[in-house]
Image: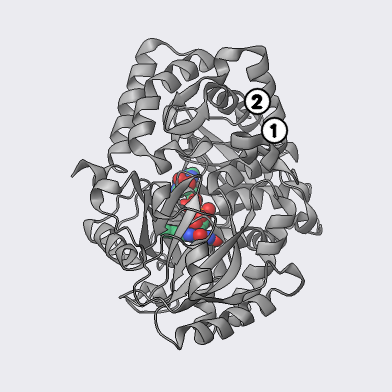
Amino acid sequence: MLKQARDRAEPWDMIIVGGGATGAGVAVDAATRGYATLLLEQADFGKGTSSRATKLVHGGVRYLEQGNVSLVMEALKERGLLRQNAPHLVSELPLIVPSYSWWEGPFYGIGLKLYQVLSGKYGFGASQLLSKDETLKRLPSVNPEGLTGGVVYYDGQFDDTRLLINLVTTAAEQGATLLNYARVTKLNKGPDGILDGLSWQDLETGETYEARSRVVVNATGAFSDSVRHLAEPDAAKMIAPSQGAHIVLDRSFLPGTNAILVPHTKDGRVMFALPWHDHTLVGTTDTPIEKVTLEPVAFDQEIEFILETAGLYLAKRPTKADILSVFAGIRPLVKMGEGKNTAALSRDHTVHIDPSGLLTIAGGKWTTYRNMAQDAVNQAATLGDLPEKDCVTKTLNIHGFHTNAEKFGSLAFYGSDAPAIRQMIDEDATLGRQLDAELPYVEAEVVWAAREEVARTVEDILARRTRALFLNARAALRMAPRVAAILARELGKDEKWAADQIEKFGQTASGYLIGSME
Ligand SMILES: Cc1cc2nc3c(=O)[nH]c(=O)nc-3n(C[C@H](O)[C@H](O)[C@H](O)COP(=O)(O)OP(=O)(O)OC[C@H]3O[C@@H](n4cnc5c(N)ncnc54)[C@H](O)[C@@H]3O)c2cc1C
């Protein structure tokens, strides 16, 4: 990939800046249309917001309440397409809205029926009113005091970075060149003032390269304005960043297979408690922020707010000491004029073209990445005067596609790759060793990530190829030395490199430990 990126003399059809959900989706779309495509990501694929979602493939019940029916319909359709194209990663999740007064059941029941109807032929399970007993049976850990019943409805659940790495692989299989640790440092203009390429730096060697392109797509999410400013320093900002935090607890807080949706928190938002990878994931918040960073840290008040809200709905009230991991992400909300309330900003996506010809695709959500990519590539093809080609991603299987992946047990999320990992273990039993007693990950997954999924650092493996850091930060720290040793062997690095990796990972992991350090 590096060689292809460095050696290409002729211009690319499309260079994509940013390797999150949006950029990877654009790369898959562009490559499948036959365009010569290069994607450059400054850190690891998914290091930005795309590893930090609530893990729902959803239409967004909240937007329905706000009357944004077309946004919900589009997302519900994409939800169905994603389950169709990546069944190894998307599963159906029953969510229950517990009710604590007589009117809540019928009230939410009607709204959630509409949600179901809007999904049409892409529907998931049917929503239904539950009695108090049925609610308690499905949610044994829900606060029983004053409970009158509930409403169950269905959405999708996924693993965001597993999907992302599968999209990166899909794009590569379709002929795209994709690099992580390659930062775009400059946007270059031709004599007419229109972009004709860019400069990028290989962050592993420090070398800088130039690449020419017919069109440049800015898919940098919350960083969109900083990349736009490389071409036009005075361009008015289009992103209003907003932070959302999650906490992870052990499974005992939410046993079973059902999730909880809290329809109205104190600040008028929705909040979720979900079973995820045998843990309990609770979030999220919505806090406007000024500064966008790659490793945002949850604010104390966000953690307090999540704990307080969860405590109202769970029989066992979680405390800071129960938090196994806490992570924050930044929503790249698109501004629709002035206003301070980020919850009222556009959740829709926007394709914006600057006078320099830089095309920015931002906003939307993970669920709608495919549709966002389709819109962006349609426009980019016109802008770059590329041969017209139809989008084919609606029916494109994503790498790993498998309709019965559960049979692979703890390797299910690898889909059709799972047998190859199993075979590695069959050939060398030491690779079947678990890396930590509290998480299911084995040594073979480290080797696989290094050889097949372009993992370059300990963090890549513990945060995004596996989800150890997001599930249990202390366990991830315990795993780091062994992961560093295996990765050093795979990448041909020395002991000093491994020690440095362990230290760097320790620094990153400290941001996920806030709760449990108190
Ligand atoms: C708390 C939270 C919960 C969410 N939950 C859900 C959910 O449950 N379901 C759902 O559908 N959506 C959810 N979303 C929304 C979804 O996660 C985002 O819309 C999506 O991940 C945005 O992806 P992106 O690719 O646009 O941005 P990012 O993932 O941030 O990717 C942008 C990338 O650009 C790179 N970059 C920046 N500058 C440069 C440069 N100069 N050179 C090269 N690369 C660069 C960054 O390193 C980054 O990796 C959630 C969002 C948040 C914040």
Report x, y in % for residue 437. 42, 28
Outermost residue on the front side: it is: 133
Q: Can you tell me whether the CB of the residue at mark 2 lies under 8 Å from the nearest atom of ligand 1?
A: no
| Residue name at image x 57 percent, y 54 percent | 22
User: Toward the viewer: 279 or 146?
Assistant: 146
Disc 2: which residue: 421
Question: Residue 447: which quarter of the image?
Answer: top right
Q: Which residue is tagged 1?
A: 417
Nearer to the camera, 349 or 207? 349
The percent position of residue 87, horizontal first and vertical second, equals: 70, 50
User: Residue 146 at what x, y percent from top left?
Assistant: 35, 77
**Compared with residue 481, is residue 381 higher up or lower down, i.e. above or below?**
below
Q: The residue under label 1 is which amino acid type?
A: Asp
Q: Position of residue 396 (x, y in %)?
A: 77, 51
Find out whether the residues at labels 1 and 2 contact each other: C-beta distance under 8 Å. yes
Q: Quadrant of the N terminus?
A: top right
Question: Is residue 228 in sight in this rendering?
Answer: no
Q: Is residue 309 visible?
A: yes
Residue 21 located left or right of residue 379: left
Above or below residue 132? Residue 256 is above
Residue drawn at x 58%, y 50% as measured from the top left: 23
Alpha-carbon neighbours of circle 1 within 10 Å: few (<14), some, or many (≥20)?
A: some
Q: For the C terminus, which image quadrant?
A: top left
Whether 241 is drawn above or below 24: the answer is below
Q: Amino acid at mark 2?
A: Ile
**Could you say which quadrant of the image residue 243 lies in?**
bottom left
State the residue at coordinates (31%, 61%): 306
* SS under mark 2: helix
401 sits left or right of 56 in the view: right
- Callout count: 2
Q: Residue furthest left?
A: 518
